Amino acid sequence: MKVIVFGATGMVGAGVLIECLEDPRVESVLAVGRRPCGVTHPKVREHIRSDFFDYADAATDLRGHDACFFCLGVSSAGMSEAAYHRLTYELTLAAARALLALNPAMTFCYVSGEGTDSTERGRFMWARVKGKTENHLLAMPFRAYMFRPGFIQPLKGIRSKTRLYQAFYDVFGPLLPLLKRLMPKHVTTTVNVGRAMIQVAAAGGTRRVLENPDINELAASAAR
């Protein structure tokens, strides 16, 4: 497969990129981001851009891919709903529409989050916006899968770019094995997210909205 990874400099995207490089089913990776991902590998090519709402200049680079793993995202903390909507819904749909026009048979995997509100009417702003984004992606005429991870443990040397999150991992990292035992349905890893995305892109999946247990189950089947 030839895949595109959006957000390879973030914690989740970096984890997905590592799994792509290690999986023989992935032939090549186009890393799309605002800055270089810092990975040098024969499979990796980069597309650096500042505009994530208009891809008219990117057709040559984006055409000819089998899957997109969309890992771009921002925290809603301190943001107005309008600003979060633009950087979550509008930004994601702009990329999805451009990719669909160039690769109509593409598989599109979107990193959403546990607690996303498919009704778009809940009390939490981020969940409503994520739900709207999911609903519109699922209505598009390509294979789209919504990934809703809960707590994500970074593995293989990956660190969160968000200082607060990394501080949490640094302090509570030793407790993660206990957390997995106490709340197995709510904990996953960067490895599992990456492997699950590759699995659905390669073999499809019976569910298009994947909760945390689904992600872990798909990752386990990919490992076998």
Image (cartoon, rainbow, N blue to C red):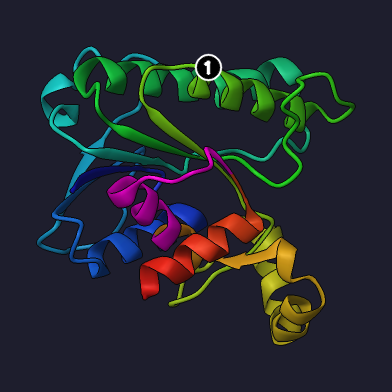
Q: Toward the viewer: 128 or 10?
A: 128
Compared with residue 215, is residue 122 higher up or lower down, i.e. above or below? Answer: above
Q: Toward the viewer: 30 or 203?
A: 203
Q: Using the rendered view, name the quadrant where residue 74 is placed.
A: top right
Left or right relative to 108: residue 55:
left
Residue at image coords 75%, 78%: 172
Residue 205 lies in the magenta-colored region: yes
Q: Toward the viewer: 223 or 88?
A: 223
Compared with residue 145, is residue 189 higher up or lower down, i.e. above or below? Answer: below
Q: Secondary structure at mark 1?
A: helix
The answer to whether residue 160 is visible is no
Residue at image coords 86%, 25%: 122
The span shown in magenta is: 195-209
Q: Amino acid at mark 1?
A: Glu
On the image, the x and y values in percent for residue 202 come to 28, 50
Circle 1 packing at 10 Å, graded few (<14), some (14-19), many (20+), is: some
Left or right relative to 48: residue 130:
right
Tell how many labels. 1
On the image, the x and y values in percent for residue 109 come to 43, 40
Residue at image coords 38%, 17%: 141
Residue 33 lies in the magenta-colored region: no
* Main secondary structure of the magenta stretch: helix
Among all residues in the image, which is located at the extreme front? Answer: 206
Q: Toward the viewer: 87 or 163?
A: 87
Among all residues in the image, which is located at the extreme right? Answer: 123
The residue tagged 1 is 90
On the image, the x and y values in percent for residue 51 come to 36, 21
The answer to whether residue 168 is visible is yes
Compared with residue 132, is residue 194 higher up or lower down, i.e. above or below? Answer: below
On the image, the x and y values in percent for residue 9 come to 41, 52
